Image (cartoon, rainbow, N blue to C red):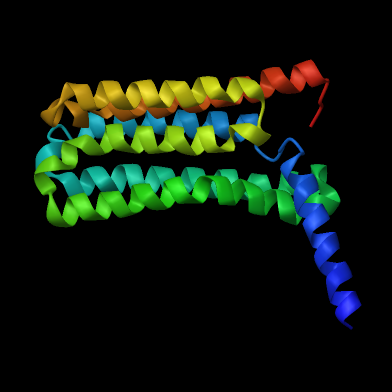
């Protein structure tokens, strides 16, 4: 029985190693582009219905948290379907690897949002920039199993995050600090995936 357990452990380790050396193709460019459009729509909704976000920070958070949740649900649903279709036998390992790379940054963003809201509400204007910087770290962490050009969206989010923080104060809560950053950023991610797929002759 010990030999059987050892063999199973060895097979699991080999599968994990194979997953780590395989390019992940579970992200669909059309869905990612749709999340970019949703960010632009959320920005337009904020501009129309929330002219003073600094004094209604809960509504501001609700707009962008709901946009993020819907986007994550769309990406996650397609990721599971595409990964099982494209990576077949390695699907579970590939999904685990993708989630493992991005989960720390997502968790850090959620915890930091809670801490600022609960203990330092005067610093809430920093959130858009901080979210973008944290998102860029998630992309950089994932770059090793994604197309090399994915470093460009990571750099975009880092740059927009720094610019947002440099605005300081209530200007940083403008709808377009989020709309432009995530709208164009997700469209850039989609473009990178489409370009890479066309170069590789991938019809998926």
In the image, residue 172 lies at what x, y percent? Answer: 20, 28
Q: Nearer the viewer, residue 29 or 92?
A: 92
In the image, residue 161 lies at what x, y percent? Answer: 32, 27
In the image, residue 185 lies at what x, y percent? Answer: 46, 24
Q: Is residue 131 visible?
A: yes
Q: Nearer the viewer, residue 161 or 66?
A: 161
In the image, residue 91 lies at what x, y percent? Answer: 77, 51
Q: Quadrant of residue 141?
A: top right
Give left or right: position of 197 versus 4: left
Can you name the residue that lies furthest to the bottom here?
Answer: 1
Q: Residue at x 81, y 54 (%)?
A: 15
Q: Nearer the viewer, residue 137 or 187?
A: 137
Q: Residue at x 68, y 17 (%)?
A: 195
Locate the N terminus and report the quarter of the image it occupies: bottom right
Locate the C terminus and report the quarter of the image it occupies: top right
For residue 19, above or below residue 142: below
Q: Residue at x 73, y 54 (%)?
A: 93
Q: Quadrant of residue 137?
A: top left
Give left or right: position of 194 versus 183: right
Give left or right: position of 47 versus 204: left
Number of marks in picture: 0
Give left or right: position of 177 versus 155: left
Q: Residue at x 23, y 30 (%)?
A: 48
For residue 97, above or below residue 168: below
Q: Is residue 180 visible?
A: no
Q: Nearer the viewer, residue 144 or 167?
A: 144
Q: Quadrant of residue 127?
A: top left
């Amino acid at each position: 029985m010990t030999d059987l357990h050892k063999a199973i452990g060895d097979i699991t380790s080999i599968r994990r190693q194979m997953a780590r050396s395989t390019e992940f193709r579970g992200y669909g460019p059309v869905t990612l582009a749709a999340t970019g459009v949703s960010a632009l729509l959320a920005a337009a909704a904020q501009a129309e219905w929330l002219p003073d976000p600094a004094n209604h920070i809960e509504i501001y958070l609700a707009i962008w948290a709901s946009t993020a949740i819907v986007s994550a649900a769309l990406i996650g649903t397609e990721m599971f379907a595409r990964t099982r279709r494209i990576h077949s036998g390695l699907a579970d390992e590939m999904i685990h690897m993708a989630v493992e790379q991005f989960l720390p940054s997502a968790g850090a963003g959620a915890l930091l949002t809670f801490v600022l809201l609960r203990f330092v509400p005067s610093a809430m204007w920093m959130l858009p920039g901080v979210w973008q910087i944290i998102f860029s770290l998630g992309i950089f962490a994932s770059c090793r199993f994604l197309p090399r050009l994915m470093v460009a969206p990571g750099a975009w989010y880092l740059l927009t995050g720094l610019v947002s923080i440099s605005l300081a104060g209530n200007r940083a809560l403008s709808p377009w600090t989020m709309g432009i950053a995530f709208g164009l950023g997700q469209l850039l991610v989609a473009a990178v995936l489409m370009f890479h797929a066309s170069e590789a002759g991938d019809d998926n």
